[in-house]
Every structure is written in C-alpha cells, then in structure tokens.
Image: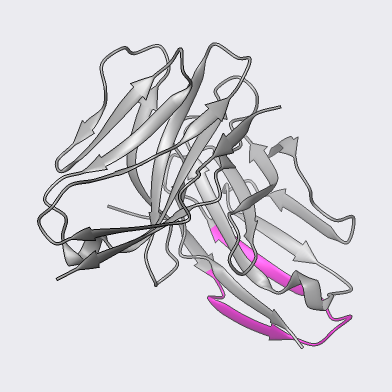
Amino acid sequence: AAGVIQSPRHLIKEKRETATLKCYPIPRHDTVYWYQQGPGQDPQFLISFYEKMQSDKGSIPDRFSAQQFSDYHSELNMSSLELGDSALYFCASSVLTDTQYFGPGTRLTVL
Amino acid sequence: AQTVTQSQPEMSVQEAETVTLSCTYDTSESDYYLFWYKQPPSRQMILVIRQEAYKQQNATENRFSVNFQKAAKSFSLKISDSQLGDAAMYFCASHVYNQGGKLIFGQGTELSVKP
C-alpha cells in the first residue's frame, strides 16, 4: 500500500539559511499534519491542512510557514534557521481527522 | 487542554513473555480517539492500534491489545508473546475528532526485549 512520502530524508543547513520540506500524502487522503520531534522528545504538532486550507495551528514559530497545494502535497518552509530547529520533522496524512499515518520523517541538522 | 501521560520511561520484557505499557489521559471531550504508535530505531512512527472512545470493546490487533478504562481515563497496551522486533519507543496519543484532529502524545516508553 502507498505510504506518506517525505523529501528530503536528510537536510543539513547553516544558521540563518532557509529550508523547504515536502510531504506527499497517501492517495485520497485530504488532511496533512506536520510535527516536530526534538532529540529524546515526543512529537509536537506544528500545523495542519484540510482540503488546502489551514485547519489548526500549534507551536509553530513565525519563521515557519506551510501550505497545501491543489494536488494535496504540502510544503513546510523554514527561514532564518536556528540551532534549535535541528529535529526530525514528520508529516502525517489522514482522511478527514481520522487515523493519521506518518511519513518516514526529514532529519534536519542546523550547523 | 488535552494531556497524555506515560509514567514508565523504560520497560523490559523477556522474549515470548507479556508486557503492559501504561497510559493515562485527560480530556473534557466526549468524542475522541486513542492510539499507540511504535517508533523503532529507524525513527519511523508506526501505528500499532487505535480505540474509539465510544466503543466499549477493547481493540485488538494480533499480539497487541488495549485495556481501555474510560471512566478512569486509562489506556494501556498489552503485548503478548513479545518478539525482538517489538523493541522500540512506544507513544500513547489522543486526538479529538472534531477539533482538527491533531495528536497529543505522551512522553513515550522505551521497551527493550531480552532474548
């Protein structure tokens, strides 16, 4: 069965640079969620989209923005990167707000 | 606000034995789901089992089952016939169906399986 696809899988950036993370949900899933997992921590909700509209917002820094496109893929844009942004970023998808299935994650390292 | 608490940072089980991971949650909502996710060393988040709050029957998926005590707001995971591949971090999570569906995770329980 098709799963959630995230790219890139690994990303290394310098402080103050910009990063773009991409997420391709499971086909026919209409809702996308973004989570951030720091080392030794549980995942923290950042933002979600339903049918291309933002549906909920969590503890997402103002330096981050995201959107969902007409083909339902989503992108998380991160600017002015800080050392503390180093984390594993997960995308998850679902039908409406039903069970979420996670992608493999993007490991972001900020040097 | 919703909260999820896992009070066991680490657990250990002998291969082929049974282990129970604990989770408590707090919500004022009546319509919600509860989940257990497994995160092996690969860091992939894998759905193990889910429980709808309106269902009284405990969910079961092969060797995995839950003990859902709604009044006590308790949601424990039982793993029977433990296998080496069960070694992972296990996260309990909840979401409210009609409030965007974001997941609230517990702190996680690291399960090790001894051969």
Whether residue B49 is visible to the viewer of this picture, yes or no, is: yes
At x 57%, y 75%, the residue is: A8
Quarter occupied by residue B25: top right
Residue B63 horizontal/vertical position (percent): 15, 43
At x 9%, y 56%, the residue is: B16
Q: Nearer the viewer, residue B29 or A94?
A: B29
- Magenta span includes A19: yes
Is A15 placed above or below B105 here? below
Is B54 placed above or below A23 here? above
Quarter occupied by residue A42: bottom right
Q: Nearer the viewer, residue A8 or B114?
A: B114
Residue B65 horizontal/vertical position (percent): 23, 35
At x 60%, y 60%, the residue is: A41
Residue A106 horizontal/vertical position (percent): 57, 70
Number of residue marks: 0
At x 84%, y 81%, the residue is: A17
The quadrant of the picture occupied by the N terminus of chain B is top right
- Magenta span includes A8: yes
Q: Which residues are magenta?
A: A7-23
Residue B51 horizontal/vertical position (percent): 36, 26
Is A12 placed above or below A35 here? below
Quarter occupied by residue B55: top left
Question: Would residue B109 be found to the left or right of residue A57 on screen?
Answer: left
The quadrant of the picture occupied by the C terminus of chain B is bottom left
Q: Nearer the viewer, residue B68 or B18?
A: B18
Whether residue A96 is visible to the viewer of this picture, yes or no, is: no
What's the colour scheme? one colour
Question: Would residue A20 be found to the left or right of residue B92 on screen?
Answer: right
Question: Would residue B81 be found to the left or right of residue B113 on screen?
Answer: left
